[in-house]
Image (spheres, rainbow, N blue to C red):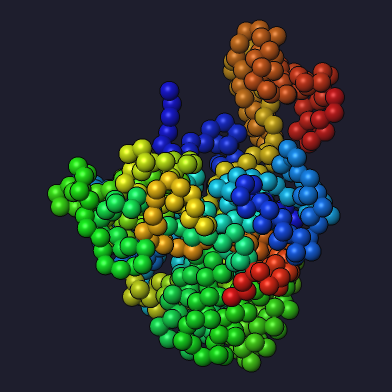
Amino acid sequence: MLTFVLPTGRVLQDAIALIEAAGLPAGGLSSIGRRLVIEDGGFRFILAKPMDVPMYIVSGVADLGLAGSDVLMETGAPLVDLADTGRGVCRMVLAAPHDQCIGECSGASGDAPERLPRNGRERIGGVPWIRVATKYPGIADRYFSSRGIQAEIIHLNGSVELAPRLGMSECIVDIVQTGSTLAANGLVERATICPVSLRLVASKRSVVQRQREIRSIREAMTAQGKGVDR
Amino acid sequence: MNRIPKGCVSYGAELGGALELCRASFMERFGAYGYVPFFPSGLQLLESSWEMLPPSFRKRLLLVTSPFGEPCCLRPDITLSVVSSLASGMKGAGRPRRICYADRVYKKPEGQDAPVETYQLGAERLGWDGEGADMEMIVLLIGALESMGLVDITIALGDVSIMRTAMNRTGSASAGLVDVLQSGSLTDFLTLVDCADIPDYSRRILRELPFLKGNGDVLDEGAKIFDDPGPFRNLRSLYDGLVSLGYGDRIVLDLGLARELGYYSGPVFDVYAPDSGVPIGGGGRYDALLQRFGVRSQAVGCAINLERSVIDAVSREKDEPLVAWGGGVPRERAFLAAERLRRSGIRFEMSWCDDSAASMRDAREGGQRWWTDLSGEEVIDLERGGSVGIASWSKGRRTC
């Protein structure tokens, strides 16, 4: 039996569609209810929080799964990223209120750097310092560090867009699909950090031990025209 | 409150016993083939190790300053200490040197919940001695893991010289390609292969190589893709040897196995246990690393990280200890009886309270099932009742 871990929430429907399109037994996934483990036709499907998907795979509980590339980047989990499914496409962005200056980060267009902040947290000994609210502290830290900007990372578990409105932070780092949530909260996209999509991932052990089955699943998923077989 | 730092671990009770069983089994197996124990210092001088460590390792060092002001790191790996120590005494050819070790190593964790310290078992073999040395390392490792009770392991076996041959014509792109492949992102690797300015011949090979895993057939497939069986000869010889020794069901060939090309130089392997999605260890040929120490010779080694899942698997296999009550006879007599148990290979715990009922109650409360009065020859089953002669019990006949 192959154990497949799927992310709950926003991308679950995308994940189920991929399972169906790949010809895997997805009947049990059409009426999940409150179940978190579903067995169907030689497959066990585990439903887990998106951020927990890598842990199920690394610990050996699951053979393979679907996880956002944002989650893979944030957790740094030692697993095998088999394919970009082309689903769940969005982007990781830096966003801030339109009148907020955010240090030396480039604008959304990638143009010239903006001015330094005006508020009390503008500089410490000449070094820019901004507060960033995010669900992705690792990604945010790497992004600002690589630009030499000192950032105070405020780790929130949701509704990140609230933070600048309430004065908790100058900007946010979050994933964006259409940008409407940002706009509704008075935020403007300043820079794209990286594209994000749903990836087919597997444990290193399973890739070795169950190569044939996993390779055929990868081929089935990438052959649907939605997947990106690079 | 007895709190230990996040990522660190103390081993006690059953886990402590299992860890010791692993250590003793490993050292005994390699010791029988002439491997000598080595105990490197806990602090390593940065000036000695920095240049020798791969960049991916450098980022994970835990740095400290010794009380004498010397910049050091906590021992991140034992191979380097062994090689550094042995290489300094090696002058070209000569008798191969063999080392085995069991100790803790410390590294900055790779993931949020990854360990900071792990208990590492390993062996290194330095000096020209032909390709039999590669097989010796794998066979001894499998034997050591079997003696720990880890029979359900898989060894992914590859050869970095195959990847090196594939990269021959890729020029400056090769380092980036290997880094990405090692990171585990096939998606990024294939993107890079497609975008890189490399010959189509190399592109075709690099697109296929990571997917070639399985039995001996993949060597034929690989040779077809390369239009040349040459790069596969060593690996085929090693694989065929292991199969004829009866290890075919434990070995999976993995032609995409990537390691730092500047350090490794031949057959390499990863070891997988059933309860973990990541390798519990690995090893292989690292002549290139040895050369960095100024010695042109052969080097092959292996290391196993005894993570919680491995030790758990071992502890499930161990015997239940016996509680031996010595309170009913003079202590000297009890000790003589206890020595007889020890000589029979029975593991036991002494109980000295005056009252046999209290001793049995304490044993039961401690979750122990078997109890014996050292003045007699019977073992009592505290869980199900009844008793059995100690000779039968020690031979595994435990039905009362």
Q: Is residue B269 visible?
A: yes
Q: Eyeballing the image, is B290 above or below A148?
A: below
Name of the residue lying farthest toward the left: A125
Q: Is residue B234 visible?
A: no
Residue drawn at x 61%, y 21% as measured from the top left: B350
- Position of the N terminus of chain A by quadrant: bottom right
Query: Would you identify the image quadrant in which residue B60 lies?
Result: bottom left
Query: Would you identify the image quadrant in which residue B8 lies?
Result: top left
Q: Residue A84: x and y, percent?
A: 59, 66
In the image, taking residue B81 as reference, residue B237 lies left or right, namely right
- Position of the C terminus of chain A by quadrant: bottom right
In the image, taking residue B329 as reference, residue B304 lies left or right, namely left
Which of B37/B329 is in front? B37
Residue drawn at x 63%, y 12% as measured from the top left: B327
Name of the residue lying farthest toward the top: B355
Residue drawn at x 59%, y 84% as measured from the top left: B205
In the image, taking residue B141 as reference, residue B108 lies left or right, namely left
Which of B54/B126 is in front? B54
Q: Residue B378: x and y, percent?
A: 78, 21
